[in-house]
Image (cartoon, rainbow, N blue to C red):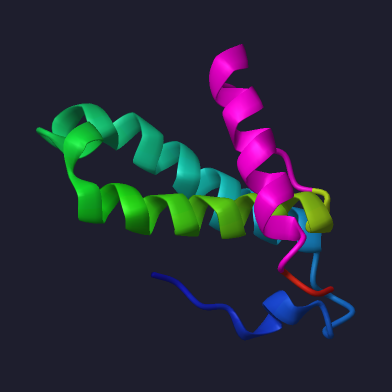
Amino acid sequence: MWEEKTATGQDPRMNVQSWVQKNLAGKLDSYLRARQYLPGYEAHPILRSLMTGLIATALVLAERAGGHLPETTPEQAAAWARLRQEHARSMSR
């Protein structure tokens, strides 16, 4: 994982959109490209469960910060939108 203390947006020099693009969208894109090299990833229940929660949280945070997510298929984009909406309701601002 990663950490940047200025990610809270309290530092006026912090560019939140840039941080989101690098740390959320960029890492999500890297994971999506790496999946092809992870045999059985799509059927592994623990990995799937962990990734669903992580991706849902990242989607909500990226949206709130004005970030853009990697390009994907329309079906995947729709699934992410549903996941983002479900989790956004339980994440206070």
Q: In which image quadrant can residue 37 be found?
A: top left
Q: Position of residue 50 (x, y in %)?
A: 35, 58
Q: Is residue 18 visible?
A: yes
Task: Decide whether residue 65 is among the magenta residues.
Answer: no
Task: Decide whether residue 88 is among the magenta residues.
Answer: yes
Q: Residue at x 34, y 54 (%)?
A: 49
Q: Position of residue 68 (x, y in %)?
A: 72, 39
Q: Is residue 43 above or below residue 93?
A: above
Outermost residue, left side: 39
Q: Is residue 26 above or below residue 46?
A: above
Q: Please provide the residue range marked out in magenta.
A: 67-90
Q: Is residue 53 left or right of residue 9?
A: left
Q: Is residue 69 visible?
A: no
Q: Is residue 63 above or below residue 53?
A: above
Image quadrant where one finds the C terminus:
bottom right
Exactly how many numbered labels are in the figure?
Answer: 0
Q: Is residue 77 left or right of residue 53?
A: right
Q: In which image quadrant can residue 39 be found?
A: top left
Q: Residue at x 47, y 58 (%)?
A: 53
Q: Main secondary structure of the magenta part?
A: helix
Q: In which image quadrant can residue 17 be found?
A: bottom right
Q: Residue at x 57, y 52 (%)?
A: 56
Closer-to-camera residue (15/24): 24
Q: Position of residue 87 (x, y in %)?
A: 66, 57
Image quadrant where one finds the N terminus:
bottom left
Q: Is residue 30 left or right of residue 34?
A: right
